[in-house]
Amino acid sequence: MSSPSGGYHKLAAIMSNDKDTSIFRRFNDLNLLSLLSLNAEILELRQSLRRTCLLDDIHEQEDEKKYSSNFKLSRDNNSEQYKSIEVLRYKLKDYNELLLQISQINILNTPQKSQLSGLKGWLNDARNGFLKDEETQTWHDETESLYLCLATDLAETDAFTETMQRVIIGPWHRLFGYHLKTGKVVDFECGGVSYDKRKIDRASTMVATIPSAMFPVLTIFILNVLQSTNARIGLTALFTMVFALVLARFNSAKRVEIFAATSTFAAVEVVIIGSASSSGNQNFINGPSNATMAADT
């Protein structure tokens, strides 16, 4: 007997073949609401247990006075204190389990915009429009933090790589990838294809390396050509600002790393300005001397 091939069954098969599409709701608000409810119940049970313990301590019966210091006696007599502890134990178990589950869920990766867009694009295809009623809201929101992704190899992706995934992969597949069979087909009916993110990361690194290698050389060339020291200083400020903005926008580096790289770049520019200024002053000094020597001759 063949297995069902449509609806959620097809979506599950695609998620199995391409972990980047295994995106689900976090339901943080509902999880926290349930946790808050358990928290309130436990506080109420604790207060009830304390009242029971106080009543037992002042009870006329000697056995009941011993319940707070003799759990076996309390358990054997099936006392109210023991019953209260039993109820509290089960509530604490539910509370602690839910607390640990929420903490584990928060560790799971948040999907990237390109991953969420890819899943929503597949769902919006007319051949895959099986969601009905409230289920259409499952992946409706655009905010990535509302979802989690079960893919475990999600590397920290910078804005440049995300741009490549969102803008370049589509045209690349239509022009070259489809004919070269470079992607992994995850849906033969719709032609859905998945590309290895590690290869995309390597490609984006190669593309970004070229301008990053040329930028300092171009800066040195321009500063060396300029004759005015004020112009060099002004362009140094401009180049340093552009360098820092590019690092902040298209790189996942921390602030301290961006500050260190920008400071190093600025220091190199200052050395170039100093060298160019010294060379210019030397030419100015040698110029009149050579003219005087020519006149004396």
Image: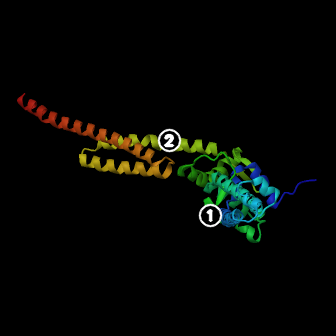
State the CA–CA distance, disc 2 to disc 1: 32 Å
Q: Quadrant of the C terminus?
A: top left
- Which secondary structure lies at badge 1? loop
Kindly indicate the quadrant of the structure image that contains residue 225.
top left
Q: Residue at x 63, y 43 (%)?
A: 198
10 Å crowding of disc 2: few (<14), some (14-19), many (20+): few
Q: How many marks?
A: 2
Q: Position of residue 176 (x, y in %)?
A: 66, 47
**Residue 285, image x and y in percent?**
15, 35
* Residue in view at x 83 percent, y 60 percent: 6
Outermost residue toward the right in this view: 1
Q: Cβ–Cβ below 8 Å for labels 2 and 1?
A: no
> Which residue is the site of mark 2?
209
For this rendering, which residue is in front, 175 or 220? 220
Residue 95 seen from this side: yes
Residue type at mark 1?
Answer: Glu
Residue holding disc 1? 142
What amino acid type is highlighted by mark number 2? Thr
> What secondary structure is found at the residue carrying circle 2?
helix
Up-down: is 11 above or below 260? below
Q: Residue furthest top?
A: 297
Residue drawn at (72%, 60%) of the image: 65
Q: Position of residue 79 (x, y in %)?
A: 78, 62
Q: Is residue 80 left or right of residue 44?
A: right
Identify the coloring: rainbow
Viewer-proximal residue among 63 and 170? 63
Residue 38 appears in the rendering: no
Q: Who comes first in sequence, dot 2 or dot 1?
A: 1
Quarter-of-image position of residue 81: bottom right
Q: Which percent across, then down, holds residue 92? A: 71, 58
Res. 139 image quadrant: bottom right
Which of the pair 282/69 is nearer the observer? 69
